[in-house]
Every structure is written in structure tokens, then in C-alpha cells.
């Protein structure tokens, strides 16, 4: 079945030069985001999730370089642009960034400027991309703040970030991301440091805005519970590589990669017996500057074979579109 993809990342490689070391933050990453759906990008801290998102936005720090790959953006079916053909400061990228593709950053506290009002910070994004008079722009912002559950939006428009709670700041970040009705919203750990009730509210808000505007969402998280709640498709990353990709149901019902299986075994399940212990993933994540001849997960994998040390496994694609990087399946073994 052919899918309509709004974003396709192909063989992306992003590296950091840190002193004499080269850190392989993103290695040969390929990800597809279907139009109007939510893709969960999940993995441990430092696995390359955020760097992948920043590569799409071309907001990488000076030490980072995109060495290879394509980032194909399709504003509408049949139209495709490779974003890497434009420079990070080009007019084309600055036009797309914020309007067509927007991002909610991980920490609203550091993303919001403490000396400007909330309204003026949202207005800055709107003025950069749309030609509206001040009255019309203010009306649009106030309406969006109201939709996002911010009480007394007229008054809050004139408030400063320190006057908002953590959950309310995250709502403001969603407003900044959604004010221009983007085709793609990248949400980088949007519920980090929020309590469970507020987490659920933020996820519900993103879903609601997605349904209203038809936005495609890339949701970056380390929490498999959030993935189960909010996503349609899942990409599992480990040490800069996508090790498994597929539909949500397929990933949860039949996880194929040993790392995905280990992640799911480490998640508490409602109703599980008190005598059942959660499993931890053996070992620790290796230094990202180490270049492995074979699979990066091999030192921690209970199923590793000799071939796993020798070469990187290719991507194997199964009938339902489920993709996995693991030599064991090529060898015909079930795990």
C-alpha cells in the first residue's frame, strides 16, 4: 500500500566534532512521517532523537555537521523539496521553519524569554510569516490561547513567563508552535518534568490541535507509555540508528529487535502482579565516539551471534512494512 508521506528522512548522518573526537550522533537514519499522523521517535537519552529533529529544522550547533542524507519535505501530495539543498540561513529554510515545520522544544523555561510578554513572543512568530494587522494578530493569538486551555487569555496575553506554571508554559510553547498552522509539528519531549495529570492534558491538546488542523506530528520521547497513548507509527533509536520502525500495533504486539523487546519489558503494566519485577537492560550505553564494526547493541544483546560483531545489519522489511535492523532475522532465527 502506497502512503502519502509529508516528511521522509533518508540515510541521514549528523556528526559532532568535539576536540579530537568525532561523535556519531545520527548514523544512517531513515524515518517516514505519514501525512496527518503522529510518529513516535523513542529511545534512551543520547540516542540521537533530538539531533535528528534539529537536523530537520537545521538548528544544529556549530560543532555539528550533516555529512550525508536527504530530508524530503512534501508540503502537498506530489510536491517534494530536499531541505538539505538549502542552507541553514537561507530564505527558503527561514520561510519553512516556524510556518511549515515548527518545533516545541524540550524545556519551556529556557525557550521563553523572561523579559517579554507571552503575547509578544507568539506575535513575533506570526509577524515573521503572515501579513496581519496588529488587531487581527492579537485576536488570533488570544483565540489559540483559549483553545489551549489557558484561562483569561486576554489578560494572559500581557503576562510574563514567570507568571505561568510549568504546564501553562508548555501550553504557550504549543501556541508558538501552532500559531501558523504548520504542516509538521516536532514535539521534543513535550511532557518532561510535568506531573502525570498535566502530561495527559498536554498530549490531549496536541491530539486535539492535530485533529483540527490536520497537522503531522513527530513526537520525541523516551517514554513507551506516551508512545502507546499518542502515536500511530514508531521509530526506535539506539546509538544514532533506527533499529526498528513500524505501525504502533505492530511494534507493541510483535517487537522484533532485542532492544525494543528490552524497552517494553522495562515498562510497568497496569495490573501486573506485585511479585513480578521489571527488567532492566543489561550493561550501559557505549561512548558515542566509538565506531562499531558491527551492531551497536551487540555488547548488551542476549541474542548476539558472531556476525553481530562483524558488520552492521541491513534494514529488513517485512510484509506489513515493519522494518528491523538485526542479523538474527536474516539468519532465519526467531527471538
Image (spheres, rainbow, N blue to C red):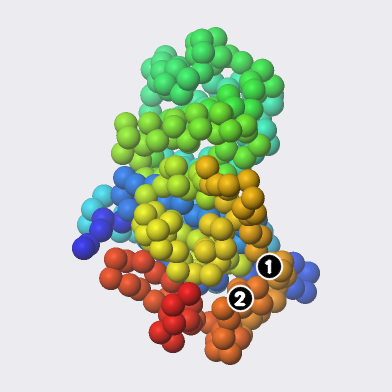
Q: Secondary structure at mark 1?
A: loop
**Nearest to the observer: residue 181 or residue 131:** 181
Q: Residue 302's mark?
A: 2
Point out residue 45 in the picture as x, y percentages from the top left corner: 65, 56
- Per the image, the residue denoted by label 1 is 282
Query: What is the spatial separation of the Cα atoms under label 1 and label 2, in whole angstroms?
Result: 9 Å
Which image quarter is the N terminus in? bottom left
Percent position of residue 52, x then y: 53, 58
Residue under the point 57% across and 44% down: 189
User: In x, y percent, where is residue 75?
Assistant: 31, 49
Q: Residue at x 55, y 39 (%)?
A: 190
- Would residue 36 appear left or right of 188 to someone viewing this image? left
- Give the total number of marks visible in the rendering: 2
Q: Is residue 332 left or right of residue 260?
A: left
Question: Residue 51 — which label?
Answer: none
Res 65 seen here: no
Residue 37 seen in render: yes
Of labels 1 and 2, earlier in sequence is 1
In x, y percent, where is residue 39?
A: 42, 51
Residue depicted at 44% across the width and 30% down the height: 205
Nearer to me, 173 or 17: 173
The reply to whether callout 1 and callout 2 are in contact (CB within 8 Å) is: yes
Q: Residues within 10 Å of mark 2 (few under 14, many from 20)?
A: few
Does 133 sit above or below residue 248?
above
**Residue at 41% over, 47% down:** 231
- Circle 1 packing at 10 Å, graded few (<14), some (14-19), many (20+), is few
> For numbered disc 2, what is the local secondary structure?
loop
Amino acid at each position: 500500500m502506497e502512503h502519502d508521506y509529508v516528511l521522509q528522512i533518508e540515510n541521514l548522518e549528523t556528526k559532532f566534532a568535539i576536540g579530537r573526537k568525532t561523535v556519531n550522533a545520527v548514523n544512517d537514519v531513515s524515518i517516514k512521517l505519514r501525512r496527518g499522523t503522529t510518529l513516535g521517535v523513542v529511545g534512551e537519552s543520547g540516542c540521537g532523537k533530538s539531533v535528528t529533529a534539529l537536523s530537520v529544522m537545521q538548528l544544529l550547533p556549530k560543532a555539528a555537521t550533516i555529512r550525508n542524507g536527504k530530508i524530503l519535505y512534501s508540503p502537498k501530495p506530489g510536491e517534494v523539496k530536499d531541505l538539505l539543498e538549502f542552507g541553514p540561513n537561507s530564505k527558503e529554510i527561514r520561510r519553512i521553519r516556524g510556518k511549515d515545520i515548527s518545533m516545541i522544544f524540550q524545556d519551556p523555561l529556557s525557550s521563553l524569554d523572561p523579559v517579554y510578554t507571552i503575547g509578544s513572543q507568539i506575535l513575533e512568530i506570526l509577524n515573521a510569516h503572515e501579513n496581519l494587522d496588529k488587531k487581527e494578530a492579537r485576536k488570533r493569538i488570544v483565540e489559540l490561547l483559549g483553545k489551549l486551555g489557558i484561562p483569561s487569555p486576554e489578560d494572559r496575553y500581557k503576562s510574563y513567563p514567570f507568571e505561568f506554571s510549568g504546564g501553562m508554559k508548555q501550553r504557550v510553547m504549543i501556541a508558538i508552535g501552532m500559531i501558523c498552522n504548520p504542516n509538521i509539528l516536532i514535539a521534543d519531549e513535550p511532557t518532561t518534568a510535568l506531573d502525570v495529570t498535566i502530561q495527559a492534558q498536554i498530549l490531549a491538546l496536541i491530539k486535539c490541535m492535530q485533529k483540527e488542523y490536520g497537522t503531522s506530528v513527530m513526537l520525541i520521547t523516551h517514554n513507551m507509555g506516551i508512545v502507546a497513548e499518542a502515536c500511530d507509527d514508531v521509530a526506535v533509536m539506539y546509538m544514532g540508528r533506527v533499529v526498528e520502525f513500524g505501525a504502533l500495533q505492530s511494534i507493541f504486539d510483535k517487537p522484533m529487535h532485542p532492544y525494543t523487546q528490552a524497552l517494553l519489558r522495562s515498562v510497568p503494566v497496569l495490573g501486573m502482579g506485585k511479585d513480578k519485577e521489571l527488567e532492566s537492560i543489561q550493561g550501559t550505553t557505549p561512548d558515542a565516539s566509538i565506531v562499531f564494526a558491527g551492531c551497536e547493541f551487540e555488547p548488551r544483546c542476549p541474542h548476539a551471534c558472531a556476525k553481530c560483531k562483524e558488520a552492521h545489519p541491513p534494514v529488513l522489511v517485512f510484509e506489513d512494512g515493519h522494518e528491523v535492523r538485526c542479523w538474527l532475522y536474516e539468519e532465519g532465527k526467531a527471538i
